[in-house]
Amino acid sequence: MLEAMLREDLAAGCLPRGPGGRIARKHYADRLGITKSAMSFYSEVFDQYDQLAGRLDPEEKIIAHVQERSRELIANGELELVNGNVSRTQLLGSLPVYATSLQRRRPRLKKTFEQLDAHVRSIGYVQDASRALLAKLQTALSSGVYDNLETGKLHYRALHAHLGSSGHNLAFPYALRPLIKQHEASLRTRIESDPLVRVRHGKPYSIRPLVEYGWPEETLELLLDSFVAAFEDNQKRKFSQNFNALILVLTLIASNQSAFCRDLMRFIVDRTPNARIGGSVEPFVSLLETHLYRSDWSESNRNHWIDASNAVLALWDRVSILPVSQRLKRSKERRSRSRPTIVELSSSSALTRVNAEEQQARLDGLMAFAADRFNLSDADVAAHFDKEGAAAFFETLRVEFPRIPAEIADDPVQSILYVVNIREAALVEHFVAEFEKWSAIFERGQDLWRDGVDPDSYWNDDLWGPEGRKLVSRIFPNDKSRWDYTLANVLRLVKEKFGGIVPTSTHPDRRICSFFVKRCRFLGGRGFLMAHLFPHKNLIGSAISLYLIESGANIAVGRTLKPMCIHESDQVGYKIVIGNKSKARHKPIVIYLEDDGGAVTAMSWLRDKRSQFLDDDKGVSRDFFFLREKGEAIQPVSENWYLDWFKDQTGNLEFFQSRNVVAVPSSLRPTTMMKAVLDHNGKTRYAITLAQHTESVSPSYYVRLPILFLHEEEHRHYCRILETISLHRLPDGRAFIGVNEAEYAERLEEFEPTGFGTRCRDCLDHPRSPGKTCESFDCWDCDNAILIAEPEEIAPLIQWGEALAAAEGDWMADHPERWQTYFAGWREFIVFVEETMQQPHLVDIWDAARELAARNMADPMYRAYHPWS
């Protein structure tokens, strides 16, 4: 049947041709209802009819068409030029040829176009439409209206509007460019010949406009020479800032009509001594400072002007142009806003712009919620909302309130800690899942590629020959049932012939490029294919995120970790991760992370698998732990890439979408810092977290609303303790605890000494164990306890405090949790008593108690307390 079709078409002279001039195989495959690849079985038949019909070269036909079309367009003045060359798109518009294919597929057609380009340049061809524009441009340039005398160029936007020309990014038609270039060259020559102009960094700097303010040209030339001599070594930006400040200062002196400014101008111009000049400089400096502060500039921009103005004044003082000893004072730049924690993040509060009335209504609603939910007075609410970020905390609590357990809903600190934990847990769960998913794919890829066919058996020139299609179909079948077989062969080919990196569409060999594009399309994309040989970007990003969450480090520390950053620890169950921060002079940041945590698991996996995808002796592999593959290159993780990746990952999480929250990586560090303070072992964790970074950590990381709540709770707690301090030796001392004289005497009789400086009203009736003997050790937090403000009573408490101080180190090293349970409260109580008794009416009692305690402890028979026994 195929031969009958070919004979019929040959006789009719309508054999379909393919791009190479041969008979089109696909045409007959469609007519027969079979695949194009099946036509390879009829290759001998097609070769026979190719010889009978003669192979037609379609490129010759295209070249003839292009030459004929170009002659016609040149004769009519309609041939378009693009950057001085004939327009390929115009000449190929009606042909099935892309201009981009000339470079690699049609070299003869490319040469034809190059000959046409040379021809139009030799005859000086100008398109008819450009001739009218050229005449209009000549008239516009001769008027001088569009000359920019400051830059030596034309006002392009205005000139475009006048000509009515179109061009991307203010580009003029090619025919107009030589005239524009010639005019700008003459314009620059005219400007640079001006004695009041100096050229630096390729830009003319002119002070001629100051002549209009009354400055003589000779004086301006002298000032300009001294300025250039002093600042010519500055970089372009700094030089421009100082020059603008020079113009500003000279303009202000000349334009101000005050007597002291006229004296200054006369002194600079005439160089004549003036008795009033000493008194004129100071008010001028004040005037200049006021002028800068009245400008509508930010603090940062204003400081740039102040620095540049000071540089000009210092120059004048140095070269004796004007004796100026004063300098302008820099304005204090506003402190940048603190980074929000994960609790404060909310798209409704952080990203939505609202007017003042809506904002006030929102705050009123949040204040009402805070007062009602947490039993706060109006004064307390107002004080809280005066703090930065307070509204965001209360807004989050209002949103999360239905989900917060009832037993902690009335405690703002525990409620916020609960929100921190669930949001942090959602992030950890997602990143752990992503790590497990892509690490499994990588490990499977390492097993698969070893089972692939050896590339040496087929990767040669035969693959691109006549039988190459059969070979490709056999080794890389596009069959879903043999997907693993194809994947294994592709992976081994990439591993052994391309260094483990899948070639991209920019590969110089177009055959290889086309080959891998087809394989990647079948196997799920290049990114998925690369994930079998190199850790996927989601795996790398998840590992960094887990490290940041658990460590409290910032992004700069996480992404620049070194390959050998993980070390063993003498603490059981922990690993040490050492990083550094360039802004802190590469100070080492030592962090202890739990062995079974997500961060150590992910980072240890990357360390163990590193040799399978990297050579640590080459390139950036020697310097960075976290690396990613992009465009056939291995490169370190950039901060911008990580920010975009993090937002993309968390933005699709249902947990955050349902709460209208936009999570950002900058919230991880302040969240860790705040959580360290709020946690049950807060002071210890906070100290460790702070020590891991630097002593100058900004308080904005941890001085936030929940911590303020925590401080207030401690304050109220110790106010209750204060009631147990008896002051009966002071006049009206009982007034401090609100009891009358009889009750006061009765209370003292009831209390028995505990041996630690405090007294107990009833050791057989503990408030938390009614009717039972007291077995507790928390006298500092007991309603039955009282402390009498006498040296004999306070001295044992001081001795007990000294014993605790001596034992604290051993307890914190061996049993920190027991120290927090039994002894930490005593230490805080004793510190509170000491601070309370520094008041004028109590300090004498405290001093006497310290002297008595010192004498007791110096006694050879003294037996110290042993809290460690």
Image: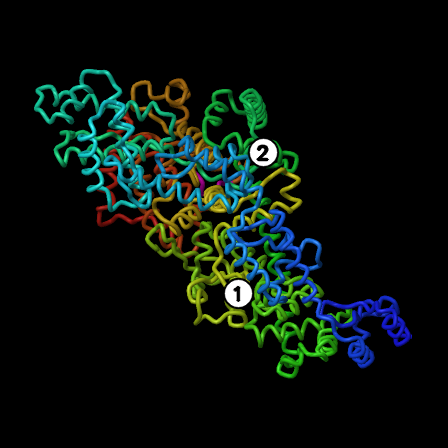
Q: Is residue 207 left or right of residue 357?
A: left
Compare residues 274 and 198 and report the one nearer the observer.
Answer: 198
In the rendered view, how is the structure colored? rainbow
> Which residue matches tag 1?
606
Q: From the viewer's perspective, is residue 824 above or below residue 70?
A: above
> Which residue matches tag 2?
397
Q: From the viewer's perspective, is residue 361 above or below residue 351?
A: above
Q: Quadrant of residue 206?
A: top left
x, y percent for residue 216: 20, 26
For image coordinates 42% across by 49% down, the residue present is 689
x, y percent for residue 498: 56, 73
Q: Predominant secondary structure in magenta?
A: loop
Tell me whether circle 2 and circle 1 mark residues in contact (CB < 8 Å): no
x, y percent for residue 520: 67, 65
Residue type pointed to by label 1: Leu
Q: Which residues are magenta?
A: 773-780
Compare residues 851 and 400 and report the one nearer the observer.
Answer: 400
Residue type pointed to by label 2: Leu
Residue 581 drawn in magenta: no
